[in-house]
């Protein structure tokens, strides 16, 4: 599934321009391999996304470049979005060899795994092999992603806030002359979904996967766990979201859509709907946006995609930490891993090769900084957000020259979420967290996707969550949050 889908000081356009110029120079001159007699180092890199047919072909070209620049080659391993967290947990726990790995607030949790010792502390490496990263990436990301005062990952230099949108296959919108002006909430989609269901039997009206969550007025203590504060909170009270009227209304809407056939009957076990996107057999879904996202999606899918806001642009902990690369605590080559990450985030040639593939095969250049996808681009459609600094990417055909200025404006519009800067320490309640996670695996996807009746299952879920220790977790979160609130004059 393509997720083109996810921060305290803002990135000025002049800084972007200067750093892009400097990084281009650095990529072309300053990082050449100065020790050609040394044996090349192979780095094992685990990253997230639907495995791509041409990954091996592209990595072979990347390796020619990185071998010349820093005497490094890559073994890139991709794990699909829905499987990433579970598979990485198993491999890291078993000591599977790896050097670099994707982590975030929503996949293979950055904060929790930093505290568990899965990642190397990067402070010294950043001062040495990673200096270009520090000079290039928006300082807000580096500051906002510290855990207990230290950096354990390199955030992608990208959009600052997180804003959800409803996306639409524009060909179907136009075919039935459907109006988006009244679509503000999930419930507002109903008449549009009904039209598609009645007239397009081969189309899935609402493309959804098992990790779906309705847009809710909450800032979550742990993302995709049922503890949160309201977005407009003044007392910072932590609530069980399954006891709120808002969740009941949202779950009933999801259930209504499921029963009407707007959602796939297999949604509770689906980890990807990439096949629907490739075939154009979907009408709407929800995704995290960024400036010019509609154009990016349209280029990726090969047909027009449009969107309308489903939420405000909030700056969350998870958006600050929404896409990161960490170095494994067990890496045998931490200096070379940082050297590679430095190159990835400062060298436009490498960054664009990893993102867009091979010139003349997957894309062609139509100007010095703009590309057009070729038919084989469908064999190499990477999750752009997951690969580092997007501010040195080529423009896509149709992008305006001021694209990165629009990113700055979007960042300026961000509204700080109430828990921004608060990182929950779960060390005292690890057993309860594990037990609640087990209950979540049983109930979360069926409830959130409408696959079961909330009138029957919501009470059962709450009962099991409480038995697993949810109230104990909430009490600990409240204690820590009260202390943080007092210390930060909230």
Image: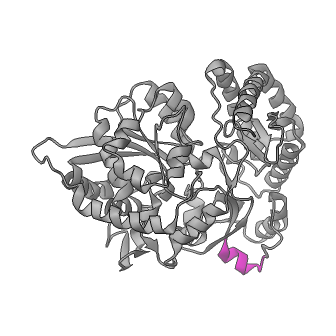
Q: Main SS of the magenta segment?
A: helix
Residue 189 occupies which quadrant of the picture?
bottom right
Examine the structure image and report whether residue 419 is included in the region drawn in magenta.
no
Q: Quadrant of the C terminus?
A: top right
Residue 174 on the magenta span = yes
Residue 268 in picture, x, y percent from top left: 69, 43
Asked whether, in this view, residue 264 is left or right of residue 255, the answer is: left
> In the image shown, does 275 or 81 lie closer to the viewer?
81
Task: Using the image, determine if residue 125 lies above or below residue 140.
Answer: above
| Count of numbered badges drawn on the protein | 0
Task: Please name the residue shown 58% across and 48% down the image.
Answer: 320
Q: Residue 25: x, y in percent?
A: 28, 64
The answer to whether residue 55 is seen in the rendering is: no
Q: Residue at x 40, y 67 (%)?
A: 18
- Span shown in magenta: 169-178
The residue positioned 48% from the left and 29% from the top of the image is 90
- Which residue occupies the foreground of this view, 344 or 486? 486
Height in image: 123 above or below 254? above
Front one among 368 and 463: 368
Q: Is residue 145 left or right of residue 247?
A: left
Q: Is residue 457 above or below residue 302?
A: above
Residue 369 image offset from top left, x and y in percent: 39, 75
Please give the name of the residue rendered at 79% of the width and 52% of the height, measured from the top-left corner.
258
């Amino acid at each position: 599934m393509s997720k083109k889908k996810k921060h305290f000081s803002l990135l000025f356009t002049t800084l972007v321009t200067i750093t892009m110029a400097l990084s281009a120079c650095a990529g072309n001159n300053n990082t050449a391999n100065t020790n050609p007699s040394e044996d090349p180092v192979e780095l094992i890199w685990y990253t997230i996304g639907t495995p791509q047919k041409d990954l091996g072909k592209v990595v072979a070209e990347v390796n020619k470049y990185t071998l010349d620049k820093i005497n490094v080659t890559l073994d890139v391993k991709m794990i699909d979005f829905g499987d990433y967290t579970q598979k990485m947990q198993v491999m890291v726990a078993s000591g599977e060899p790896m050097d670099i790995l994707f982590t975030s607030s929503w996949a293979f949790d950055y904060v929790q795994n930093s505290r568990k010792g899965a990642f190397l502390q990067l402070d010294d490496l950043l001062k040495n092999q990673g200096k270009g990263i520090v000079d290039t990436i928006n300082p807000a990301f580096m500051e906002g992603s510290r855990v207990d005062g230290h950096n354990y990952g390199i955030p992608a230099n990208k959009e600052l806030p997180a804003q959800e949108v409803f996306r639409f296959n524009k060909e179907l919108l136009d075919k039935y002359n459907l109006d988006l002006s009244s679509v503000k909430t999930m419930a507002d989609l109903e008449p549009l979904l009904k039209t598609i269901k009645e007239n397009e039997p081969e189309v899935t009206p609402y493309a959804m996967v098992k990790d779906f969550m309705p847009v809710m007025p909450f800032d979550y203590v742990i993302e995709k766990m049922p503890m949160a504060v309201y977005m407009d909170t003044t007392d910072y009270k932590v609530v069980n979201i399954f006891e709120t009227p808002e969740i009941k209304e949202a779950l009933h809407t999801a259930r209504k859509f499921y029963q009407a056939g707007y959602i796939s009957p297999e949604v509770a076990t689906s980890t990807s709907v990439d096949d629907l996107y490739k075939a154009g057999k979907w009408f709407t879904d929800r995704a995290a946006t960024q400036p010019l996202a509609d154009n990016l999606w349209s280029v990726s899918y090969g047909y027009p995609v449009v969107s309308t806001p489903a939420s405000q642009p909030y700056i969350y902990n998870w958006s600050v930490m929404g896409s990161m690369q960490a170095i494994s605590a067990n890496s045998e080559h931490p200096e070379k891993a940082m050297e590679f990450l430095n190159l990835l985030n400062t060298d436009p040639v490498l960054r664009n090769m990893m993102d867009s593939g091979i010139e003349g095969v997957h894309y062609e250049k139509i100007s010095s900084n703009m590309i057009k996808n070729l038919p084989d681009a469908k064999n190499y459609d990477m999750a752009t957000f997951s690969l580092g600094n997007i501010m040195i990417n080529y423009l896509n055909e149709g992008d305006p020259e001021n694209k990165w200025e629009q990113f700055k404006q979007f960042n300026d519009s961000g509204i700080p979420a109430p828990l921004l800067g608060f990182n929950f320490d779960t060390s005292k309640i690890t057993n309860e967290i594990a037990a609640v996670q087990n209950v979540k695996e049983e109930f979360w996807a069926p409830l959130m996707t409408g696959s079961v009746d909330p009138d029957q299952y919501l009470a059962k879920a709450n009962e099991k969550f409480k038995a697993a220790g949810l109230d104990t977790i909430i009490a600990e979160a409240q204690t820590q949050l009260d202390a943080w609130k007092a210390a930060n004059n909230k």
